[in-house]
Image (cartoon, rainbow, N blue to C red):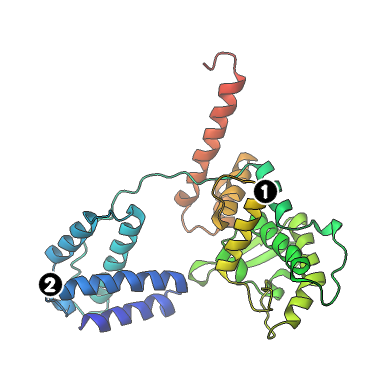
Amino acid sequence: MRLERAVDAYLRHISIERGLSDNTVAAYRRDLAGYVAWLAAQGIDDSSEVTAAIVAEFAAERASAQPPVAPSSLARLQSSVRGLHRFLAREGVEDADPSVRLRPPKQPRRLPKALTIDQVEALLDAAGPAPSTEAAVAPGAAPGDLLGLRDRALLELLYATGARVSEIVQLDVDDVAHGDVLRVRGKGAKERIVPVGSYARAAVDAYVTRSRPELSRRGKATPKLFLGARGAPLSRQSAWLVIHSAAERAHLTAHVSPHTLRHSFATHLLQGGADVRVVQELLGHASVSTTQIYTYVSVDALRDVYATSHPRAR
């Protein structure tokens, strides 16, 4: 099969049948475009011409590229290539999978960066006013008055649920109408139910009743929960800017991203005694091994307490 057709078929498969997110499909498309271009430079334009030696040569060349490719990017690239050839073999397009011996590079263990509870509270306070301190927003109010309530609700919800920012910006108003739980649609279109604490619930209620109606009037009707200043659904990039701006106002010198709140959510739960399996379910991880990286953070915290508290620790 022509490589361009093979790639298109594979991307349709992971998008429609496997339900991978648009961002994941886009990343695979970029990776495979580079792979096909490299094969074309070798005079290969059909999947039947790809051998194990050619796949190994491609992987070795990318691993030794200058400037170096990040291990995570290299691992994803190899995953894209393996996925393509595995798909072609499984569908009977090709007799064998030439990438079967390809092994991903060893990833360095990076502990997720989590904020302290005090830092989280400073970040939330910098995002916008607490619901109990904000009067009703009048029609025609300035964007800043409207967006403060929205930004506070956005960050409160991210920290309260540990959801990914892509999951939060996709929420509809109806998704938060179930009392103290939230229905989250995660990777692969999988749904999970996550509890929502009273602080986040109050912040969302304040935004929905006082701020969102005015923002909604400024744009086309949409069921999305979080809206921009002109009434359009809030994008992931705009949500990132909200968090970045709040971090600057809170004078947080550490790099703060949407995932920082997710890391903080998991770390604080484990430090508070939550079972790792419960945290796995709340985060929507397919494997508990993904969640267990947060236990290293908790162990580090225990070591710090031990070192400063025990009379014979040092």
For the residue marked with disc 2, what is the amino acid? Gln
Residue closer to the observer: 239 or 113: 239
The residue located at (40%, 73%) in the rendering is 26
The residue located at (60%, 53%) in the rendering is 261
- Give the numbered dot on residue 97: none
Q: Is residue 157 left or right of residue 89?
A: right
* Residue 73 in sight: yes
Give how far across and how far down residue 219 sits, in percent.
69, 83
* Helix, strand or loop status at disc 1: loop
Q: CA distance from mark 1 to mark 2?
A: 53 Å
* Helix, strand or loop status at disc 2: loop
> Vertically, is 158 above or below 7?
above
* Residue 162 in sight: no
- Give the numbered dot on residue 250: 1
Q: Is residue 296 left or right of residue 240?
A: left
The residue located at (62%, 66%) in the rendering is 168
Give how far across and how far down residue 232 sits, in percent.
65, 79
Give how far across and how far down residue 138 sits, in percent.
86, 73
- In the picture of the structure, the residue carrying the numbered disc 2 is 42
Residue closer to the observer: 188 or 231: 231
Crowd rating for badge 1 (residues with CA inside 10 Å; few <14, some 14–19, many 20+): some
Q: Earlier in the sequence, mark 1 or mark 2?
A: 2
Residue closer to the observer: 221 or 146: 146
Residue reaching furthest top?
312
For the residue marked with disc 1, what is the amino acid? Ala
The residue located at (45%, 49%) in the rendering is 289
Residue 273: quarter of image: top right
